[in-house]
Amino acid sequence: AGWEPGDAPMGGEDEEAAAQPAAAAHSGNIGASERALAVMKPFARIAWEECSQPLPDSAGSAAVRWEVYSTWTLLLCLHHAEAERERCLRAGWTPRPWITEAQALRHLFLESRSLRVLTGVLRWLRWAHKCGGGRHGGDLGDDDEVPGNGSYE
């Protein structure tokens, strides 16, 4: 069962990274995309909180707050695709002759930044379609959940 961007809150190791972005951002054993994610997740959480709470129009319309949150989710999706590549390379992936379609797709994903960007955008589009504009047409789940952490895990 794959992760759908609107399915789960930022939990597990994502929540730990969000709780300590400065420490994660300066850790030497993670890649640049992981560090960027650690820095961005607290801002995405703030956008989610502002989007999910009824606020006066002086704080910005609900539609504008949703667009801000949606943009943070897009950025998270893009950086998660790059982080997946970093994790595979850190685990020692090396290109080999393809035997299966899955091996070919993994090789293409890891070697093509354009394909990783496309993957991130497609994940975001799936999330945006599923959520349908947040409280204005889609189901985002409980108020305690932060959907759309951008990963596929």
Image: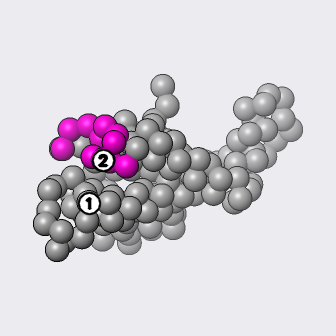
Which residue is situated farthest in the right direction here? 97
Q: From where the camera sits, is residue 77 visible?
A: yes
- Left or right position of 53 against 135: left
By secondary structure, the bulk of the magenta-drawn segment is best described as: loop
Who's the residue at 79% across and 38% down the image? 104
Residues at marks 1 and 2, CA–CA distance in whole angstroms = 9 Å
Does residue 147 appear left or right of residue 143 in this picture? right
Q: Give the image location of residue 123, x and y in percent.
A: 53, 46
Residue 87, how many percent across, how many down? 55, 51
| Up/down of 57 relative to 51, above or below | below
Residue at mark 1? 62
The quarter of the picture where residue 99 lies is top right
Residue drawn at x 49%, y 31% as measured from the top left: 2
- Which disc is residue 135 wearing? none
> Where are the magenta residues, as a range?
133-143
* Mark 1 residue crowding within 10 angstroms, few (<14) / some (14–19) / many (20+): many
Numbered label attached to residue 136: 2
How far across and how far down the image is residue 111, in percent? 74, 54
Query: Percent position (x, y) of residue 101?
Result: 78, 31
